[in-house]
C-alpha cells in the first residue's frame, strides 16, 4: 500500500548552482526509483530563520511523492549523510 509524503530539503549554497542541481537530480532519481514522484517545487534561495553552519541562506526544494511505508526512513538516512544538505524533513500527508 502506498502513502503520500512530502519532503522539504534545504541545500547549502556553498557548492554553487551546479552542486545544487546535482543534488536535486540525485534525490529526484532516488524517489523515482522507490516510488512515484508527483512534483518538485523549487522555492529557490531563501534566508534561513537562523544560521546553520554559519550559512545565512539556503536553497529550498519540496518533493511530493508516493511510496511504500519503509522508503521515507531510507530517504531521511541518505539525506542526513549527504554533504551539501543543511536540513530536511519528511512527513506523511
Image (cartoon, rainbow, N blue to C red):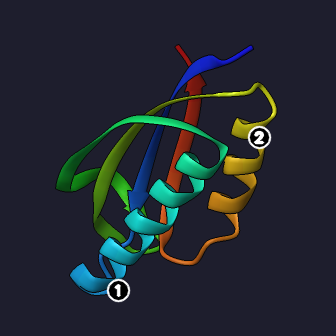
Residue in the picture at 37% in, 62% down: 51
Q: What distance separates the C-alpha of mark 2 from that of mark 1?
A: 26 Å
Q: Are marks 2 and 1 in contact (CB under 8 Å)?
A: no
The x and y percentages for residue 24 are 39, 63
Rendering coords of residue 62 (x, y %): 36, 40
Query: In the displayed structure, would residue 80 be above or below residue 92?
Result: below
**Residue 36, label in figure:** none
Residue 85: where, in percent of width, then height? 50, 66
Quarter occupied by the N terminus: top right
Look at the numbered disc 1 and give the secondary structure of its residue. Answer: loop
Residue 38 position, x and y percent, is 39, 31
Q: Answer few, some or many: residues within 10 Å of disc 1's Cα (few below 14, many 20 plus, some between 14 and 19).
A: some
Residue farthest toward the right in the current orientation of the protein: 70
Residue 81 versus residue 7 in the image, above or below: below
The reply, left or right, for residue 46 in relation to residue 10 is left
Residue visible at 48% across and 75% down in the picture: 84
Q: Which mark is residue 15?
A: 1
Q: Nearer the viewer, residue 15 or 30?
A: 30
Question: In screen coordinates, is 71 left or right of 4?
Answer: right
Say what secondary structure mark 2 lies in.
Answer: helix
Mark 2 = which residue? 73
Mark 2 and mark 1 lie on one chain; the one further toward the N terminus is 1
- Closest to the camera, between mark 2 and mark 1, is 2
Q: Quadrant of residue 4?
A: top right
The residue lying at 59 percent from left, 56 percent from top is: 30
Q: As drawn, is 73 to the left or to the right of 84?
A: right
Q: Nearer the viewer, residue 70 or 12?
A: 70
Report crowding for label 2: few under 14, some 14 to 19, many 20 or more residues within 10 A (C-alpha): few
The residue that appears at 77% across and 48% down in the rendered structure is 74
Amino acid at each position: 500500500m502506498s502513502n503520500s509524503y512530502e519532503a522539504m530539503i534545504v541545500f547549502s549554497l556553498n557548492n554553487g548552482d551546479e552542486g545544487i542541481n546535482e543534488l536535486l537530480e540525485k534525490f529526484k532519481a532516488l524517489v523515482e526509483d522507490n516510488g512515484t514522484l508527483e512534483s518538485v517545487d523549487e522555492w529557490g534561495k531563501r534566508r534561513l530563520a537562523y544560521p546553520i553552519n554559519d550559512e545565512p541562506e539556503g536553497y529550498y526544494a519540496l518533493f511530493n511523492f508516493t511510496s511504500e511505508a519503509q522508503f521515507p526512513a531510507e530517504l531521511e538516512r541518505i539525506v542526513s549523510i549527504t554533504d551539501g544538505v543543511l536540513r530536511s524533513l519528511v512527513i506523511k500527508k
